[in-house]
Structure formats: structure tokens, C-alpha cells
Amino acid sequence: MTEAAALDPDLSTALGDAKAWPFEEARRLLKRLDKIPGGADKTVLFETGYGPSGLPHIGTFGEVARTTMVRHAFKVLTEGKIKTRLLCFSDDMDGMRKIPDNVPDRAALEPFLQLPLTSVPNPFGGDYKSFGDHNNAMLRRFLDTFGFEYEFASATEYYKSGRFDEVLLRTAERYDQIMAVMLPTLGAERQETYSPFLPISPISGRVLYVPMKKVDAKAGTVTFADEDGTDVTVPVTGGRVKLQWKPDFGMRWAALGVDFEMFGKDHQTNAPIYDKICKILGGLPPEHYVYELFLDEKGEKISKSKGNGLTIDEWLTYASPESLALFMFQKPRTAKKLYFDVIPRAVDEYLQLLAAYPRQDAKGRLDNAVWHIHGGNPPSHTVPTGVTFSLLLNLVAASNADDKSVLWGFIRRHISDASPEVYPLLDQLAGYAVRYYADFVKPKKRHRAPDEVEREALKALSDALAKASQDASAEELQTILYDVGRTIPRYQDFAAKGATPEKPGVSNAWFNSIYEILLGESKGPRFGSFIALYGVPETRALIEAALKGELVAADPKASP
């Protein structure tokens, strides 16, 4: 991550005009420091929260990635003169209220319901002692792989080590004030049993949701009925109790002095409660940033316990971390579906933005997502002009490649200096394309036979390509496609921009038919770019195979 002191002078002059949302949030943080005595001398604390009730999902990564972008924007605005920290806090002392759907043996975990997650046995095996420890490790592994600069914090460790003791004692002292905030938010039945304190049963070790019979602020203790019905008095310190999740938010903010935390829209209505409790406990609530939730393919909220949506590892099997970071950067306050079909578009948009960066002025660069993704220092290497992830997927489809070396054979014919060493990003993309195609495109392919109009159109296209020069560019080949299409009444579009009676436009139906017949897909990138990369002779051979019915015959799912 590039430090602010190394910021290009031209970019420094454009900082005041930068409109990207991380800069907007960083400016709000600067205003916050004005409210704090000696604020300019404090270390600004960014926090992200994680509930390890299930394996980390992409939403968890997104929270850290987005917070990191705000943190970097803050460093740049302050020229690195104000220290910052990022704390990734795991609420791993929370009781396991239900068994996740995506664990190996759900029945084996039933005896451990309501135990703190760090006391539940690890169902995945390996060296981790508990379910919480395993899930925390999975989160850290990815954050480390991506290169985030952060500190990890465990609620279990913080409660048991005494890090929260001072504020927990204050919670006992101001118990009535906190109850006055919480009770109006609860139903009548819940009000009868509610307490911000959740004691850990000395008998079973479970997290108990029971009313307090007595809160002794002076002694710093609470009294409650344990699971066997006997009254038990325990200190509120040393990990013998934890707080309900809403008071826990406010307590943590007050105890740690958190300055910035973002959370999903499902927390939005509770944010005023968190703030009030933080103030009651002597803290200044942090700046918030509320983002929209991710949805799965069916439009349902992604859940760690359900395991729906994409996992971190799944995305990284088929695309780069940078493409995932771009998906997180774009429109955080807009609900987005997060499933496998979004990956190719995210990859191609990342490539477009990376290619555009060197050509942009200072303001454009500061608003470009790649500046934020790469901490102000986007890589200079990119891919050859016209090559996209979608194009590589089509190349895999046409060549039946099962290894990226096959793709490199085509690429080298089109780009003389092409090699994995010269284009390392392209080499990565080729590997991703082979895997993505095999798992998601190939199973859905549906070749169909051409009708009579399409047969004649494809013959005309093949004849026109035969006359093309061997070094025809992608644009020249695209022009050939247009010229053939506009001669066929079915594909003529007289309403297209610039169309005339003598030279009509070409409808999308022409290109759709090409993709459906030749590649078994309904759409794709510019076909001229595909021909340039795949080769004119190879494309003509593909057309010939389609006309002979060979593509349909080889595809058991094809439409006659």
C-alpha cells in the first residue's frame, strides 16, 4: 500500500475534487477528529466485525476490503501524518444458537448448542481446537493472502484477558440507563427476561439468556439462576459474562475508541441503539458506513450458516482477488447479486479500468477503482488490446482447450511477442478461463442447427472471411461481420444510429445466431476480436463444422 507521502504531485492537486466514496468517508473522519480533544494526535481506529458462526463468506472480505480503501484514502488526505489501525474483530464468544447447514456432521454438534463458538469442537478436523478457532483461521488465511494490513482480535481473548473489564464494570454501574435504551425496542414478553449481560454457566459453560436477579455495581457482580435452578453470583469481568450483541457493539466502541466501522443494512435500524449505549459507557460513537447486502442467485440474502452465495475460495478459483475487490468497490449502497455469473463481467471491468488508468487525468485516476484497489499504485502490466476474459472463454469453447497452453498457441499467432513472461496477467486469465469454462459454461452449452436463412448467412460470412488479409485486425473483421449481416433482410436494422436505406444497421439477432450456432451460447464479446484471436482459417472451419451438423452431433444437449 502506497503511503501518502509518495503521492504523485499531480494527484495531490486533484485531491479536493476526488469524488470516489472512500474519499467522502475519509473526509467525514477528518471532521470527526475536530470533535475530539487532541484528535489530530490520536491513532484512528478502523474496525470490522465478523461473526464466526459459519465459514467466512465474501461479504466478510468485502467489509475488510472496503474499510481498507477508506483507510488508505484517509492516509492520503492526511499525508500520512495521522496514525491508523485496522482491527478485525471476531465475535467468537457468541453462543452457537443453531448448527450451520454446511458443516460435515451436523448431528455431532447438537450437544454443543449455546456454547461459545470457541468452546464448540471443530467439526472440520485439523489442528484448530474449536469451531470458532477454525473459522477465524479461515478468515485470517484469506486476508493474509490478499495482503491486508490488519490486526486480528478475538472476543473470547478480549473478554477473558480483562481488556473489556473497565467498561463491563461501567456497564454494571449504568445498567438501568442501558435497560432504558433496550427495553422499548423489545416485545412485552422479552422485556420480562431481558438483560444486557449474558452469563456463562459455571455448570455447563453455555451462554445463558436469563434475567438478572441482582446487579451489584459496587461489587461488580451479577446474580442469576443457573441451569439447575440455583442462584449463582459471578463477576462481570474476566470472561464470566458477555454482552448481548446490541450492547456489545456499543461497549466495544467505547472500550476500544473505534473511529470508523461499516456494517450491512440489516444493522441500520440498530445503529442508533449502538450509539446510545456507546455514549452511556463514556465513548464517542464512530462514523458509520452502511452498505447493502449481497444476494444469491435467487435474490435471497447470503448467509454464513446456509452457505449460499459464493465463498472466497470459489471466487479465487475462477478469477483474481483484484476482480473481487472491484466488485466490492462498485456501488456499495446498492444491493447486488453475488453468484458465479457475475465473475466474467467483474474481470473484464477490472481490465478496462486498469487499461484506462494511464490515460486518465489526475482526478480520473483518483476516482478510478484500481487506484483504491491497489492502494494508490496500480500495476503497469495489463493485457493486449482487445483481449477480454469473455473472449478467452469463447476461445476455450471453440478450441475445446483443457489447458491454458492451448490458448497460448492461439494468442501467440495473433500477438507476436506474447508469452506468460511478457503478459503475466494474461497468463492468469487463461488459467481462470479454462477452469471457469469447464465448470460453468460447458455444462450450459446448447448448440443448435442453423435454419436455411442462417445457413446462407454463414456461408456468406465464410466466403467473406476467405478474402480477408492474413493480418486483418479485429476491427476489420468486425466490419466484415457487419457487411455480411446488413445484406440479409432478417438482420437489417433501419432504426440503428447512422443507418440509411442504402446501408442499414445490423440487429443483435445476427450476432446472437452466430454465438448460438458456433459456440452454443446466446451472447459474447465482439466476434471480430474472437476471429482475430482464434484465426480466420479456424473460424471458417468452425462454420463448416456447424453447417455439416458436426457441432450439434458432438453436443448431446444441442437443439436440432
Image (tube, helix red, strand yellow):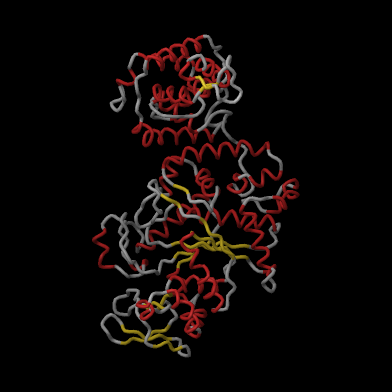
Closest to the observer, 274 or 372: 274
Above/below status of 468 relative to 288:
above
213 or 4: nearer the eye? 213
Q: Quadrant of residue 111?
A: bottom left
Q: In which quarter of the view is residue 241 placed?
A: bottom left
**Can the viewer see residue 363 in this picture?**
yes
**Number of marks:** 0
Residue 243 image offset from top left, x and y in percent: 43, 75
Query: For the point 63% across and 66% down, which residue is it?
Result: 43
Q: Is residue 139 left or right of residue 365?
A: left
Residue lying at the far left of the rendered structure: 107
Which residue extends farthest bottom?
218
Q: Nearer the viewer, residue 160 or 511?
A: 511
In the image, 227: left or right of 150?
Answer: left
> Is 146 on the left or on the right of 223, as rendered?
right
Residue 74 pos. (x, y %): 65, 58
Above/below status of 344 relative to 188: above
Residue 101 placement (x, y as % from top left): 30, 56
Question: For this view, does 106 lie left or right of residue 175?
Answer: left
Q: Which one is nearer the viewer's eye here, 363 or 76?
A: 363
Q: Is there any visible trace of residue 252 in the rendered image?
A: no
Question: Where is residue 96 drawn, in percent x and y?
Answer: 34, 66
- The quarter of the image holding the C terminus is top left
Please, is residue 372 above or below residue 199 in the view? above
